[in-house]
Amino acid sequence: MISLIKISPSVLASDFSRLGSEAVKMEESGADYLHLDVMDGHFVPNISFGAPVIASIRSLTKLVFDVHLMISEPLKYIDDFKKAGADIITFHIESDSPVEETLDKIHACGCKTGLSIKPGTPADAVYPYLKKTDMVLVMTVEPGFGGQSFMYETMEKVTAIREKINALGLKTDIQVDGGINPETVKVAAKAGANIFVAGSAVFKAEDPKATIETLRNNASI
Ligand code: DX5
Ligand code: ZN
């Protein structure tokens, strides 16, 4: 049984000089979540923004803040992101923080958890944590930059994780992130994903509202 479809536009592709109005535009365009990519220049080669920037737009929208931490020591910063207004906090299994302790800490502060794997990390790395996490994020590009091409080879992992979730009788969400557009969303949905992050496809579109609707419809086929 697949959980509800959600579309989560990534602000990495937005105009940072007007981040607040970009967030509001996404809410008005029918997005479910707002995906906020935090990069520390260490876990990934790029630096984006941190908790104060997220806090600065929190009061402008009711969208679920889906915070994707691409940082080496997520455990240290959970409280900061909670205070900034995160609803879902996702971190990487490849980070230096202990996985179970970090999941527990996120839940203890009242947020939902996401556990992410990079393209090179096998699906079974997340199996021991499926009962402890609300969401698994299968990266469909190497984390660090927007605008990359979807890696089709990651779909085997989505299918394997969805089968495992079903076998355990869980309702864990599977999110995909990187290179999602109206075509690749179909492939990812068929493989078993139900939450779709899209940066360039939504923010660079002439009509973001129509694009979000297309993504949603194509994921539902
Ligand atoms: C990449 C980020 C993604 C990125 C997706 O490291 O995690 O969320 O913004 O961008 P697109 O959709 O342009 O590939
Ligand atoms: Zn992301």
Image (cartoon, grey):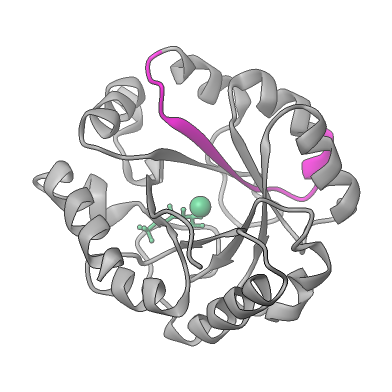
Report the number of numbered marks.
Answer: 0
Q: Is residue 106 above or below residue 44?
A: above
Above or below, 37 relative to 166: above
> Which percent across, then down, holds residue 209?
16, 42
Direction from residue 87 to residue 212 in the image, left or right: left
In terms of image quadrants, where is residue 82? top right
Segment colored magenta? 60-76
Q: Residue furthest top?
A: 59
Q: Position of residue 127 (x, y in %)?
A: 77, 72
Residue 212 locus on image (x, y percent): 22, 49
Q: Is residue 66 magenta?
A: yes
Q: Residue at x 17, y 44 (%)?
A: 208
Residue 213 vs 36, above or below: the answer is below
In the image, taking residue 165 as reference, residue 1 lies left or right, namely left
Residue 28, compared with residue 153, is above or below; it is: above
Q: Is residue 210 left or right of residue 61?
A: left
182 relative position to 171: left or right: left
Of residues 96 and 63, which is closer to you in this image?
Answer: 63
Q: Residue at image x 34%, y 78%?
A: 187
The magenta stretch spans residue 83: no
Snapshot quadrant of residue 130: bottom right
The residue that appears at 38% across and 68% down in the rendered structure is 148
Depth check: give the residue in front, 11 or 90: 90
Instruction: Assign ligand 1 to one image quadrant.
Output: bottom left
**Residue placed most toward the observer, 101 or 69:** 101
Residue 139, given in percent of the width and then of the height, sits at: 54, 67
In the rendered image, the quadrant that contains the C terminus is bottom left
Q: What residue is drawn where x is 68% and y is 79%?
A: 123
